Image: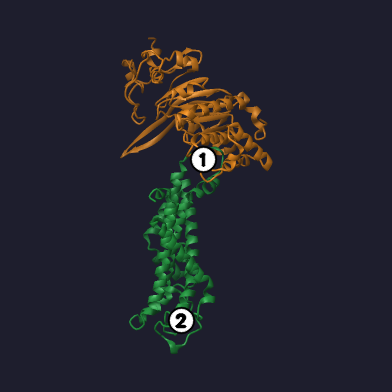
Amino acid sequence: MIFRSNLIVGLTIFALVVLIAVFAPLIAPYDPISHSNLLYAEEAPGAQFWFGTDEQGRDIFSRIMYGARISLMIGLAVQTMNTCVGVLLGLSAGYLGGWWDEFVQSLTNLMLAIPTVVFALALMAVLGPGIVSLLIALGLTDWAYSCRISRAQVLTHKSQNYVQAARTMGYGRLHIMFREILPNIGGPLIVVATMGIGSAIMAEAALSFLGLGVVPPAPSWGGMLARAREQLMVAPWVALFPGLALFITVLGFNMLGDGLRDLLDPHGKAKR
Amino acid sequence: MDDLLFKDASAAANFDALDVCDLCVHYPVREGFRRRLLKAVNGVTINIRAGECLGLVGESGCGKSTLAQAIMGLVPITSGSIRVAGQDVTDAVQRDPLSQARNVQMVFQDPFASLNPRQTVRQALAGPLRLHGMTNRDEIEARVVDMLARVGMKADAADRRPHEFSGGQRQRICIARALIIQPKLLVCDEPVSALDVSIRAQIINLLLQLKDELGIALLMISHDLGVVEHMSDRIAVMYLGRIVEEGIWHDIFTAPAHPYTQALIASIPDPIAPAETLRRMKGEAPSALRPPPGCAFNPRCPVAFDACRLGDVPYFTPLAQAHRVRCHLLSQGQ
């Protein structure tokens, strides 16, 4: 059953994060922003504050719960954008070929050569901090993998007889790309998209850490880490718990992606 | 069957179902720094009358499938012309792919790859009807069920997906899909070579029966003379991009004139035949990238002589009615 363990652990973590994010206002013991009391600043983890408090006396446990909302929302939204852009480009490049294919491939190589965070950083510098510009910056920078994979998949399916049969039937290019080929290449794309959610969450955290992501009082794991850095020696829990949350969530998405790949890949099934 | 789909059917009746004239399909191929020209189809002229079945035979790599793809408009042609039911294919795929589709349909070799695994049989059959302008749901459903019955499948097959069927059943579905929009010509590219021997006869008989019922013309492509023997009115033998012999069924089998045809017929296993009297050939077909000088068959030909190694093959020598051969032996009157 090693085969399924990735999927089960990944799904469990994913479900947990979703539940926490959705029900944060109901289950969080304190308000993440307004409940600050300098008398309780940098309190160590204990019965009153499970994960301790930060430098302003805010409950870290509550802030992590609310932070899950931002991380999850940004991870899903960014990855949806990336996947749409990547699939659209990869599908059309693979099926149409010619100059469009060469153009898309050069663009993909270009995007792969620039580190995502650096490119997003540059975009954020132009757009200014905030969630909307964060979505734009991250959603348009990390589509290279889904583009490559969809293109490669299209190339293997394009020469198959069922696509040729659709062509001889008189179907147009759009029908063949989206109705014939796309449903058949969905499996690998879902895997790439799932794994990408993890890296999108990481990228959001990185940008917030650098002060360009979610604007401060709002709780974001990356932003919490950034401010915790200064008190790392005095109050390590301020950094530890957001870091752990980030680590577990990203790990969960990666395991989910791995598990889905094993589940969807027909060649993997033989090893069961 | 009523002509719901195409009203222009009668207009095309005067034309040959297929008219290929001096067709060349060449591919530029890079080998390291050198560029070569792969002449997959090299000056082929064939025609099929309405309702006729032409068998096209040749070894792997002789250009049979390229010819089929060119007829379907799937590969660009280098020179020459292809007309299906009087309509130029190159022109039709650009301007009016739907009318090209209603003129000619294809059954592919591999029934496991030629159906979209995500579509049910109903989707695969009803989609083309809708694409070609049928809107009434009941009418579409009736046509799908009727077509399934014609290919020997039950109506409940419509809700299943391709992986639930065997190779033979899938090939029946492929035939149903190809015929559901009532084409005038059906191109079958090795339709039975991926199937079990026990299923082959069923599919061949089905094709013959549908040909008579629906009055379609057939282009039956195979590497196996035994397969086309049973169904073809005429047979064309192809070798390295060229038609080397063409004639009615009886002439090809009783009086094959080209050494290659003779060798092909000799290679059909026949337990009751006496000791081999026909000429056998040796070696493998040369690559179309490096055709030998002279007649392409000369390195393997048991009766090659000097003229065969020089220059090009002669043009067709007519032997009997509709029986013609491209061979130096015959053009020089030996």
Extreme residue in the top direction:
B334
Circle 1 marks a residue in which chain?
B
- Residue type indicated by callout 1: Leu
- Image: B90 above or below A92: above
Circle 2 marks a residue in which chain?
A
In the rendered structure, the answer to whether residue B106 lies left or right of residue B5 reads left
User: Does residue B108 appear in the picture of this structure?
Assistant: yes
Give SS at disc 2: loop
Marks 1/2: CA distance?
Answer: 59 Å
- The colour applied to the residues of chain A in this rendering is green
Q: Position of residue B183 (x, y in %)?
A: 59, 31
Q: Nearer the viewer, residue B236 or A68?
A: A68
Q: Position of residue A38 (x, y in %)?
A: 44, 88
Image point (48%, 78%), residue name: A62
Which residue in the protein does label 1 denote? B115
Q: Position of residue A236 (x, y in %)?
A: 36, 80
- Image: A235 above or below B239: below
Which residue in the protein does label 2 denote? A59
Give SS at disc 1: loop
Write down the quadrant of residue A198 in the picture: bottom left
Extreme residue in the bottom direction:
A39
